[in-house]
Image (cartoon, rainbow, N blue to C red):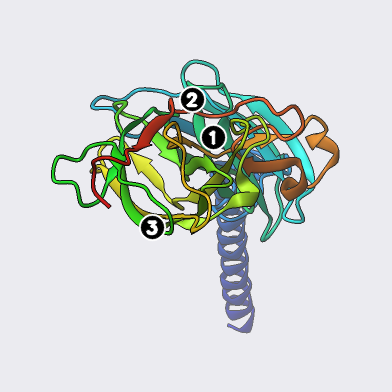
């Protein structure tokens, strides 16, 4: 009887051992199978905010005309800088307005990017954005503003109901005037207009304007006054769009109390824009040193940005006119 029980116990133990082995083999093979189904680290796309194995962030920039009625690509150059202003790289979009390039990727890494087209008269004003290089990709679409034309409509008396371009000048007088202008080229803009008005140095004591800021230091060297005249320069610190209403800037002209204005004396004004432009050795300079904003290339005195307006003149009519 005892031998029979021992045989049964041995059989039972053997069965359980066999079952345990089968279960173990099942789970082992199942785990291996599951592992086989899972993608390898090489095939797994990096999570947003995490750098890929290449250590690079792919950047895509697209530019389009801001005020166009239909999607219109605009050609751009791009300049990449470290956050301390150190130059990194540059490139061009081509006709489709799209640029794709790589920058180094790391946690919390950012770059500064300047997007611009410096072609005189037909380029567009620069824009600066920040690249987030802490993940595999970064993309940005920008609306760009092309260099436009200003229509300097008139420089006229501020009290003449006819708006004539003359005032009744005289010794010791202070007369008011209004400058009217508008950005009149469609789907374009005019950045930080400088209003330059020249007047006789002996008969005119001062020329002032309201709603704008005196900016004598920003008058470009390439523009010189008529002999015996000097320029007064004021800045409208904004970008005018072709969709904006006409601008009216009021001013005062103060005449000398001892030197009467001659019959030929006038107040003649023109308007020019200011743009961002790069210096010849920009790659060896910081961003702030290598790129400037002004009304001319200060290294060559060449015009940059949109074209200047023609001069518009307000006469000093002594016999008639308002003041």
Residue appearing at x 63%, y 33% in the figure: 296
Q: Quadrant of residue 84?
A: bottom right
Q: Which mark is residue 312?
A: none
Between circles 3 and 2, the one closer to the viewer is 3
Q: Count neighbours of disc 2 (C-alpha within 10 A) and say few if under 14, some if 14 to 19, many if 20 or more.
A: some
Residue 306 drawn at (x, y percent): 49, 28
Residue appearing at x 67%, y 25% in the figure: 302
Q: Which residue is mark 1?
A: 60
Can residue 91 be seen at all in this image of the molecule? yes
Q: Residue furthest left?
A: 161
Q: Earlier in the sequence, mark 3 or mark 1?
A: 1
Q: Which residue is mark 2?
A: 307
Query: What separation in Å lies between label 3 and label 1 (alpha carbons)?
Result: 61 Å
Local SS, label 2: loop
Reply above or below: 162 against 112. above
Q: Which residue is mark 3?
A: 173
Query: What separation in Å lies between label 3 and label 2 (alpha carbons)?
Result: 35 Å
């Amino acid at each position: 009887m005892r031998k029979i029980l021992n045989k049964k116990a041995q059989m039972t133990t053997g069965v359980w051992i066999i079952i345990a082995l089968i279960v173990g083999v099942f789970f082992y093979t199942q785990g291996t199978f599951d592992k086989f189904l899972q993608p390898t680290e090489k095939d797994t796309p990096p999570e947003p905010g995490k750098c890929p194995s290449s250590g690079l962030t792919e950047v895509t920039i697209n530019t389009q005309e801001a005020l166009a009625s239909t999607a219109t690509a605009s050609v751009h150059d791009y300049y990449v800088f470290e956050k301390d202003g150190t130059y990194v790289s540059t490139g061009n979009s081509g006709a489709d307005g799209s640029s794709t390039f790589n920058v180094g990727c790391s946690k919390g890494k950012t770059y500064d990017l300047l997007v611009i087209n410096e072609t005189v008269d037909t380029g567009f004003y620069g824009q600066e954005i920040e690249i987030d290089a802490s993940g595999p990709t970064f993309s940005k679409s920008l609306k760009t503003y092309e260099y436009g034309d200003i229509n300097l409509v008139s420089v006229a008396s501020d009290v003449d109901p006819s708006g004539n371009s003359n005032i009744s000048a005289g010794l010791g007088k202070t007369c008011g005037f209004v400058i009217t202008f508008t950005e009149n080229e469609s789907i374009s803009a005019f950045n930080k207009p400088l209003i330059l008005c020249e007047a006789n140095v002996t008969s005119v004591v001062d020329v002032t304007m309201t709603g704008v800021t005196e900016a004598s230091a920003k008058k470009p060297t390439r523009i010189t006054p008529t002999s015996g005249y000097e320029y007064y320069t004021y800045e409208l610190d904004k970008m005018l769009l072709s969709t904006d209403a006409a601008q009216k800037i009021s001013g005062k002209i103060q005449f000398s109390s001892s030197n009467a204005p001659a019959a030929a004396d006038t107040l003649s004004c023109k308007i020019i824009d200011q743009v961002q432009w790069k210096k010849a050795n920009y790659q060896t300079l910081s961003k702030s040193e290598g790129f400037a904003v002004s009304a001319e290339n200060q290294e060559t005195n060449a015009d940059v940005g949109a074209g200047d307006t023609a001069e518009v003149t307000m006469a000093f009519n002594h016999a008639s006119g308002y003041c």
